[in-house]
Image (spheres, rainbow, N blue to C red):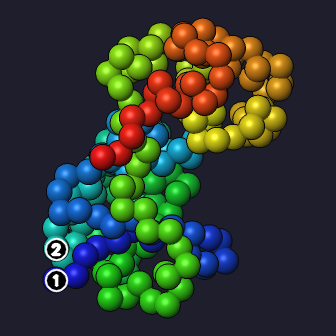
Amino acid sequence: MSALYLVNLTPTGELKSKFRLPARRLLVGRSMNADLYLGDPSVSRRHAELLVNETHVSVRDLASRNGTFVDDKSVAHSVVHPQQKLRFGAVEFLLTAEEHLGMASSSAPDTTDMHMPPVHSGSQAVLEVLTPAQRRVFDLLIEGMLEKQIAWKLDISPHTVHNHIRAIYRAFGVHSRAELLVRVLRRQT
């Protein structure tokens, strides 16, 4: 049997990215410990759990704030078959078998790792002391957003974002974004 992929499409139907799903249990969420990391604010930290096998995926919502949907129907638990839509909050995917990826898929990055590298255990303790507002800024900061972009996305002042970033740097004992990334993310091996 061929591999299963979650394919993320733009609103116009163009392929944005694809994720190869290994045959195992996967946590989906905004947490950096998630197997499938989705940095969108509509996604809960521990949003849903996927159980992947060769022919389909079972999805279970983990009491997420914005819900899990299969073909636009809200579900607590459901089986998802290839060519069905799967949405976590506002982030929508199409479950697709490898042979149905089509020609358009060649231009999309094949994100087989599916997530950002996990946080070092020492960094996890630091994350726990950040305020919820600082954590929201932190999540967008490590996605590579600029301070002004973060301010716009969170609808707060750029000065507030800057102050949160300074507090984050102090908490991690770093002086720059590069140092923060080195400290927080470990390299994939």
Q: Which of 85 and 100 is in front in this view?
A: 100
Which image quadrant is residue 78 in?
Answer: bottom left
Can you identify the residue that label 2 sits on? 54
How far apart in space, not on screen, are marks 2 and 1 (Cα)? 6 Å
Task: Report helix, strand or loop for mark 1.
Answer: loop
**Residue 149 numbered tag:** none
The image position of residue 127, as x and y in percent, is 46, 19
The residue indicated by pointer 1 is 1
Query: Mark 2, residues whose alpha carbon is within 10 Å: few (<14), some, or many (≥20)?
Result: some
**Which residue is pictured at 53% across the width and 44% down the height?**
39
State which quarter of the image contains the N terminus. bottom left
| Front-lying residue, 149 or 188 | 188
**Residue sitting at x 50%, y 29%:** 182
- Write the residue at 47% across / 24% down: 183
The residue type indicated by label 1 comes to Met
Quadrant of the image occupied by residue 9: bottom right
* Residue 81 drawn above or below residue 113: below
The residue at the point 46 percent across, 27 percent down is: 184
Q: Which of marks 2 and 1 is nearer the N terminus?
A: 1
Question: Dots 2 and 1: beta carbons under 8 Å?
Answer: yes
Q: In this view, does 140 lie to the left or right of 156?
A: left
Name the spot of residue 36 as percent of width and height, x first: 37, 51
Indicate the amino acid at tag 2: Glu
The answer to whether one can see residue 165 in this image is yes
| Label 2 element class | loop
Left or right of residue 174: residue 113: left
Q: Which of 89 and 105 is in front in this view?
A: 105
Q: Can residue 29 be seen in this view?
A: no
User: Could you classify mark 1 by the number of other residues whose Cα lies within 10 Å: few (under 14), some (14-19), or many (20 or more)?
Assistant: few
Residue 135 to residue 12: above or below: above
Where residue 33 appears, as percent x and y from the top left, is 35, 36
